[in-house]
Image: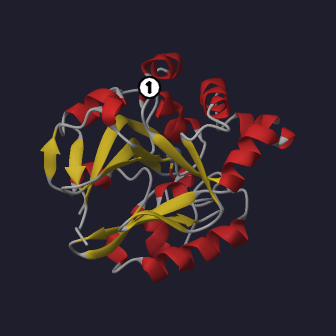
């Protein structure tokens, strides 16, 4: 099986907040930076985009610092968003899902539990949940319902040889991580199952918890799958843009 390379594309940031955002209920007095990313998994035969960043419209509405459109970011590694055939959405928070409409030809892979919660459960309209999402993400994803562009997964599923979606709830109802066959073994794109590497290292969640017990079980599951602890990647760590080989402006190769 052909190994994949994994690229982190930083589409916005840095943003600063109390450290308690990144390490739940700790580090209140510290100020920490985070970036916003999406990822591209590439081999000679396939390309999968994991999460989508956000549209220029939402970026300007939210005044996102350092924003570059996901289409332009992908262009920097010679990927045309119009041609991308596979997009995995890890979860339906605005910073991960809003850009789905930028991929008009792609199949969108989501966990069914995540989709049903956001699109169909009235609880998702309550203020603490509304805070995480945006109308455009929800209406676009709802419009794909009952089309062959939306693929709802019921738990773990290999979507292409060497790329497996893994249900890893806790941060959201049906967050999924992605296990990727690389030259160094199985790497895990954990998305917001951890905001930063320290979450995995210190066995401590980050912010926005819907189910703490599930979150801790998700850590065990992802650790069990990764070929080594260094191959567990978080959702927002600034180190992903700093400590890995840069292949283009704002793009690093993680593996
Ligand atoms: Zn996020």
Query: In the image, is residue 196 above or below residue 94?
Result: below
| Residue at screen point 61% across, 37% down | 147
Residue under label 1: 64
Q: Residue at x 35, y 39 (%)?
A: 84
Q: Which percent across, then down, holds residue 246?
A: 15, 48
Quarter where residue 240 is shown: bottom left
213 over 196 or under it: above or below: below
* Residue 23 seen in render: no
Residue 255 spot, x, y in % from top left? 23, 63
Q: Is residue 108 above or below residue 153?
A: above
Horizontally, residue 4 falls left or right of residue 53, namely left
Tell me the SS state at disc 1.
Answer: loop
Front residue (pair 33, 86): 86
Horizontally, is 16 left or right of 45 in the view? right
- Residue 48 visible, this orientation: yes
Residue drawn 27% across the image and 27% down it: 72
Percent from the top left, x then y, of residue 65? 39, 27
């Amino acid at each position: 099986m052909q190994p994949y390379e994994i690229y982190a594309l930083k589409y916005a940031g840095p943003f600063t907040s109390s450290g308690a955002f990144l390490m739940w209920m700790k580090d209140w007095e510290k100020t920490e930076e985070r970036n916003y990313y999406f990822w591209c998994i590439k081999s000679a035969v396939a390309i999968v985009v994991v999460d989508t960043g956000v549209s220029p419209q939402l970026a300007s509405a939210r005044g996102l610092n350092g924003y570059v459109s996901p289409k332009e970011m992908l262009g920097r590694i010679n990927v045309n968003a119009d041609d991308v055939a596979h997009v995995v959405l890890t979860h339906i928070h605005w910073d991960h899902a809003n850009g789905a409409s930028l991929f008009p030809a792609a199949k969108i892979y989501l966990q069914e539990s995540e989709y049903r919660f956001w699109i169909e459960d009235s609880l998702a309209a309550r203020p603490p949940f509304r805070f995480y999402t945006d109308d455009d993400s929800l209406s676009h994803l709802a419009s794909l319902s009952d089309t062959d562009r939306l693929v709802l997964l019921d738990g773990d599923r290999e979507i292409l040889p060497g790329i497996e979606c893994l249900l890893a709830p806790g941060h959201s109802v049906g967050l999924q991580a992605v296990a990727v066959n690389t030259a160094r073994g199985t790497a895990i794109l954990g998305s917001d199952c951890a905001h930063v590497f320290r979450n995995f290292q210190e066995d401590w969640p980050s912010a926005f918890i819907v189910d703490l017990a599930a979150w801790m079980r998700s850590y065990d599951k992802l650790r069990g799958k990764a070929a080594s602890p260094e191959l567990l990647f978080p959702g927002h760590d600034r180190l992903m843009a700093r400590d890995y080989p840069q292949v283009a402006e704002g793009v690093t190769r993680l593996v």
